[in-house]
Image (spheres, rainbow, N blue to C red):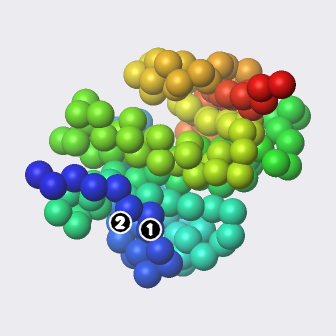
Amino acid sequence: MALAIRRATPADAEVLSALAERTFVEAFGHLYPPEDLEAFLRESYAVERQRVILETPGYAVWFLEDDGVPVGHAAAGPCGLPNPAVRPEDGELKRLYVLAKYQNGGWGARLFQAAMDWLQADGARTIWIGVWSQNLGAQRFYARHGFEKVGEHTFPVGRVVDLEFTLRREKAATPA
């Protein structure tokens, strides 16, 4: 395996769409009725929607690639989570998915770090993450990186409404 991380471009919209669907289904597809899952995937990961994300300033996506084939991705941008403490300048890790075959080798952490570095390229800022309440592994990972639970919100996939935890890592204090 020759693994590498690279920033996605608008030309990657179709590949991002397919990978986002594949990773979501691998991680969570078993939780939803097929018709609800299909409708969610069609709306959330449509090629044109991915192209808009990739073309919009203030958003970024990275691929983890194995010999040029994407096997994971991370997405970041302005925070859109429903929490009254969110400020306009806050950032959000919107997605972090790595295919199961590539997990537990440290590459997910590297992909995470690429997004964190980009989110803080112009200086420290508060970062938010939404994580499924039952995804204990992800919660432990984010806790190790300084994120704390500060609220809850819902995440609908068709008729199924998941409970999500809202996590936040405060902006690092600037040395005096």
- Answer with left or right where residue 168 lies relative to residue 102: right
Q: CA distance from mark 1 to mark 2?
A: 14 Å
Reading the image, the residue beneath label 2 is 18
Q: Assign a secondary structure to mark 1.
A: loop
Q: Residue furthest left?
A: 1
Mark seen at residue 139? none
How far from the left and from the top, in percent, is residue 42? Answer: 48, 66
Q: Earlier in the sequence, mark 1 or mark 2?
A: 1
Q: Tell me which residue sits at (41%, 75%) in the image.
A: 12
Tally the marks: 2
Q: Tell me which residue sits at (78%, 29%) in the image.
A: 174
How far from the left and from the top, in percent, is residue 148? Answer: 65, 19
Q: Quadrant of the C terminus?
A: top right
Asked whether residue 38 is in view, the answer is: no
Question: Residue 17 occupies which quadrant of the picture?
Answer: bottom left
Question: Type of residue at label 2?
Answer: Ala
Reading the image, the residue beneath label 1 is 8
Question: Type of residue at label 1?
Answer: Ala
Question: Residue 28 occupies which quadrant of the picture?
Answer: top left
Q: Tell me which residue sits at (15%, 55%) in the image.
A: 2
| Nearest to the observer: residue 169 or residue 49 | 169
Please, is residue 162 above or below residue 144 in the view? below
| Nearest to the observer: residue 146 or residue 86 | 146
| Nearest to the observer: residue 95 or residue 154 | 95
- Answer with left or right where residue 153 lies relative to residue 24: right
How far from the left and from the top, in percent, is residue 97? Answer: 40, 45
Q: Nearer the viewer, mark 1 or mark 2?
A: 1
Asked whether residue 160 is in view, the answer is: yes
Please, is residue 126 above or below residue 70 in the view? above
Question: Residue 135 occupies which quadrant of the picture?
Answer: top left
